[in-house]
């Protein structure tokens, strides 16, 4: 005779509160704490104290979880249109800073997103509207909007990959770079040698925040020049 107490139809305690948002929040916690490789449907179910099959009612596979994480992390970047109250270039810079900050807040997710074509597409669809809006307000043609937005997003992705791999506020390449330049044969890379010599250790110290702002200013100035042409 089957023991009815062991085979009751009652859901587990976790299943009573299970929702798409709860699943994604738990998944993000796993990714943040242990990395993307640690995220499996079985581990996710164990974290939520539910049967693994119950997850599939909300998210059919890991790819859907990843798309959901992109939405969870990046959907908040969409802000109301400030109109002409904020210059287009400042709107563009704000969009870039917001996207970079979201990637920086979740470095493990960022590394996965930026190495997975489908994940990149899921993120771009969520975050790109403020970029397009600012560039459109600048008076660019549709082709120019598309190309300028792609360039900016690629810059942010590349910068974020470097930042996530180092995971410190500063990256001090000065000691090694100075040593290598000093060991170059006479007359080899003279401009490099002159620049490194003039900057010295303090000038060569790299700060990610100032580096990002410098790159962003350069790109924005280039877009403004395109606009004038």
Image (cartoon, helix red, strand yellow):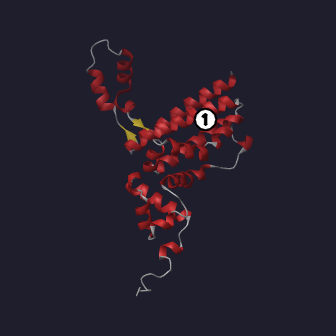
Check the image and report above or below for 193 versus 163.
Answer: above
Residue 13: x, y in percent? 48, 76
Residue toward you, 153 or 227 = 153
Q: Residues within 10 Å of mark 1 (few under 14, many from 20)?
A: many
Q: Is residue 138 left or right of residue 190?
A: right
Could you tell me which residue is drawn at 36 percent across and 24 percent down?
196
Q: Could you tell me which quadrant the C terminus lies in?
A: top right
Q: Secondary structure at mark 1?
A: helix
Q: Quadrant of residue 185?
A: top left
Q: Could you tell me which quadrant the N terminus lies in?
A: bottom left
Residue 38: x, y in percent? 38, 56
Check the image and report above or below for 4 versus 228.
Answer: below
From this viewpoint, is residue 120 visible?
A: yes
Could you tell me which residue is drawn at 65 percent across and 24 percent down?
226
Residue 71: x, y in percent? 57, 53
Residue 164: x, y in percent? 42, 44
Instruction: Report which residue position mark 1 lands on.
Output: 149
């Amino acid at each position: 005779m089957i023991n009815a107490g062991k085979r009751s139809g009652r859901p587990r305690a976790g299943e009573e509160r299970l929702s798409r948002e709860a699943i994604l929040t738990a998944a993000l916690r796993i990714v943040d704490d242990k990395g993307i490789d640690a995220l499996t449907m079985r581990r996710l179910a164990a974290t939520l104290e539910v049967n693994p099959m119950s997850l599939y009612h909300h998210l059919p596979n890991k790819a859907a979880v990843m798309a959901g994480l992109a939405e969870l992390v990046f959907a908040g970047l969409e802000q109301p249109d400030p109109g002409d109250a904020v210059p287009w270039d400042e709107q563009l810079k704000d969009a870039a800073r917001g996207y970079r900050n979201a990637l920086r807040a979740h470095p493990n997710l960022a590394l996965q997103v930026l190495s997975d074509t489908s994940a990149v597409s899921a993120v771009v669809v969520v975050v790109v509207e403020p970029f397009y809006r600012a560039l459109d307000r600048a008076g660019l043609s549709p082709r120019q909007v598309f190309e300028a937005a792609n360039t900016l997003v690629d810059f942010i992705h590349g910068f974020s990959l470097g930042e996530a791999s180092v995971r410190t506020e500063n990256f001090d390449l000065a000691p090694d770079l100075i040593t290598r330049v000093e060991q170059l044969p006479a007359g080899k890379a003279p401009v490099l040698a002159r620049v490194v010599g003039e900057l010295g250790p303090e000038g060569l110290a790299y700060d990610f925040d100032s580096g990002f702002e410098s790159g962003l200013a350069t790109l924005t100035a280039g877009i403004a020049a395109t606009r004038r042409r």
